[in-house]
Amino acid sequence: DAKTTQPPSMDCAEGRAANLPCNHSTISGNEYVYWYRQIHSQGPQYIIHGLKNNETNEMASLIITEDRKSSTLILPHATLRDTAVYYCIVRSQSSGSARQLTFGSGTQLTVLP
Amino acid sequence: DSGVTQTPKHLITATGQRVTLRCSPRSGDLSVYWYQQSLDQGLQFLIQYYNGEERAKGNILERFSAQQFPDLHSELNLSSLELGDSALYFCASSIEGQGLEQYFGPGTRLTVT
């Protein structure tokens, strides 16, 4: 699975959009981009995933660049409860690929009142 | 609430002892994954079971073992405990064996004294 690079920390004002970047320059054609988050000491929470098209769900939007070498997770109206470590994970969906999630260091997002 | 339950929430035990952590996956999920999160190692994959059979193994110590029962709940057994085994242990489940969207439980915090 491709390696990802994320900034270690970011701040965001409450009510504003939080844009979390992720670089995955070695991503291959069959690898998806997944985002999870972990609120302090709780179990990680699945947020969203995508292959090459932009995706949106009730939690967030995922924007993937055309060359697929980077992506941005957008929380449109951040709240204090969105303060968490956000993990960008690149995974293949092929049957022979590793099944576990490989968590890097992630980005600590702090939403400020 | 992810639908994954883990018991106990907290466990304090002494070195050399053996403990069992229990996980009940979301209804309908066939796969169970175990992860360890310690302060210095981050989230590390231990082992996966799919419909009762071991499917993938990570950096799981020989002192650790797991199984998945016919009702799909899983247990992680940790023996000959050492101080360094103190960590949060998370269980996750997914409906399929590829582990693409995993839903995590609240974790068991193990303290070895």
Image: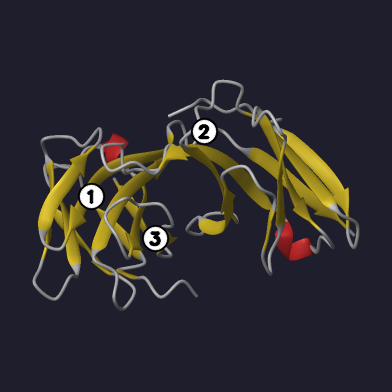
SS type, badge 2: loop
Residue at the top extreme? Answer: A26
Q: A49 or B54: nearer the eye? A: A49
Q: Position of residue A1 (x, y in %)?
A: 42, 29
SS type, badge 3: loop
Task: Quickly name the residue at label 2.
Answer: A104
Dot 2 alpha-carbon crowd within 10 angstroms: few under 14, some 14 to 19, many 20 or more: some
Parent chain of label 2: A
Left or right of B45? Residue B3 is: right
The alpha-carbon separation of the residues under discs 3 and 1 comes to 16 Å
Mark 3 residue type = Gly
Q: Position of residue A2 (x, y in %)?
A: 49, 26
Q: Which mark is residue B48?
A: 1
Say above or below: A59 vs B26: above
Parent chain of label 1: B
Dot 3 alpha-carbon crowd within 10 angstroms: few under 14, some 14 to 19, many 20 or more: many
Residue depicted at x 56% and y 44%: A51
Evaluate if marks 1 and 2 touch, with contact meaning CB atoms under 8 Å apart: no
Mark 2 residue type = Gly
Q: Can you tell which quarter of the image residue A113 is in?
A: bottom right
Q: Quadrant of the C terminus of chain B?
A: top left
Q: Which mark is residue B107?
A: 3
Evaluate if marks 2 and 3 touch, with contact meaning CB atoms under 8 Å apart: no
| For marks 3 and 1 on the same chain, the one whose residue lies earlier in the sequence | 1
Mark 3 or mark 1, whichever is nearer to me: 1
Parent chain of label 3: B
Left or right of A48? Residue A64 is: right
Q: How many marks?
A: 3
Residue depicted at x 88% and y 60%: A14
SS type, badge 1: strand
